[in-house]
Image: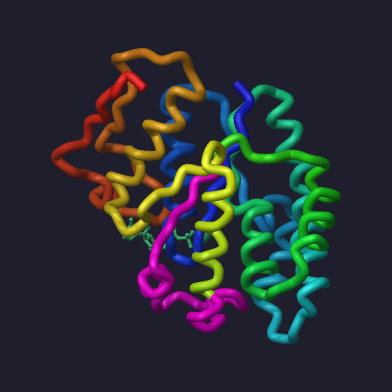
Amino acid sequence: MALFITFEGGEGSGKSFQANVLFKLLARDEIPAIQTREPGGTPIGEEITKCLKWQDTPISPLAELLLFNASRSHLIETVINPALKEGKVVICDRFTDSTVVYQGFGRQLDMETIEKVNNLATGGLKPDLTILMDILPGIGLARKRGQKRDRFEKECLSFHNRIRRGYLELAAREPERWLVIDAGKSKQDIAREIWLKVRPLVKPKRDDDIEIPDTFSAEGTAESDLKTNDNKVENTGE
Ligand SMILES: Nc1ncnc2c1ncn2[C@@H]1O[C@H](COP(=O)(O)OP(=O)(O)O)[C@@H](O)[C@H]1O
Ligand SMILES: [Mg+2]
């Protein structure tokens, strides 16, 4: 069943980690799915990402907005829309909400312009479910300590605080679309919370198979990180 799921949140909040876990759980249950990311996700998108994240020369906020949306438009046309048409679940690590938050709340670019350009790029495509990995910026950034910082990660703490506030504001405006996760919790607890939300959306409910195994792993993650003694998911009958 076609379903468009996006992950949002600040730096180091665990978006990529949980996107990988969700993708693996869908694969385990033989639910057709693809995993992609923004910016990037296509060869041209990855080139645009290099400019956006790793160029040392300044980029004007409007140029930044247009570059993100150039990457987005191509990704939607060549990857996301075809997969949705085939009835697949699409998992995207960041999407338009990142632009509203980073370019709007962060760079303080005019919101109306952002909405217009975003809408032009998406042609009206909206996520069915957006998972917000909410964390104190200091904690998220500390998780990535030691890794090379991109243009956004190098921004000051007040920028990252505006990002967090922006996300919470967007989530409060559309609570039916957003699942807000306390991203300070353990990886396993978060994986379980996300799976409990997604599982009933992708397959008719069954009592016997919504269990997270203790053997799955996510890219760049030790399997032991995910193991706990309490790895069963209970069907709450929601
Ligand atoms: N719940 C968690 N608790 C502790 N560390 C985590 C958690 N989730 C992810 N991490 C670790 O934090 C780092 C950043 O995670 P990542 O998924 O890359 O974040 P993002 O994609 O949001 O920037 C990685 O080393 C990851 O293993
Ligand atoms: Mg990431």
The furthest residue to the front: 173
63 versus 9 height, above or below: below
Report the quarter where the C terminus lies. Answer: top left
Residue range (magenta): 130-159
Colour scheme shown = rainbow
Task: Please name the residue shown 74% across and 85% down the image.
Answer: 58
From the viewer's side, name the closer residue of 186 and 78: 186
Instruction: Give how far across and how far down residue 124 sits, in percent.
Output: 79, 40
Q: Is residue 93 above or below residue 162?
A: above
The quarter of the image holding the N terminus is top right
Q: Is-magenta flag for residue 153?
A: yes
Left/right placement of residue 231 relative to residue 37 reads left
Estimate the x, y position of residue 185 in percent, counting from the top left.
29, 54
Q: Can residue 44 be seen at all in this image of the molecule? A: no
**What residue sits 60% from the left and 30% below the top?**
3
Please state if 157 lies on the left or on the right of 110 as rendered.
Answer: left
Residue 195 at what x, y percent from top left?
39, 34
**Residue at the spot x=57%, y=25% of the render?**
32
| Marker count (numbered) | 0
Residue at 45% in and 75% down: 147
Q: Residue furthest left?
A: 229
Q: Is residue 75 visible?
A: yes
Quarter where residue 211 is shown: top left
Apparent side of residue 126 relative to residue 207 in the rendered image (left or right): right
Percent x, y of residue 168: 50, 57
Query: In the image, is residue 238 above or below residue 182?
Result: above
Q: Is residue 236 magenta?
A: no
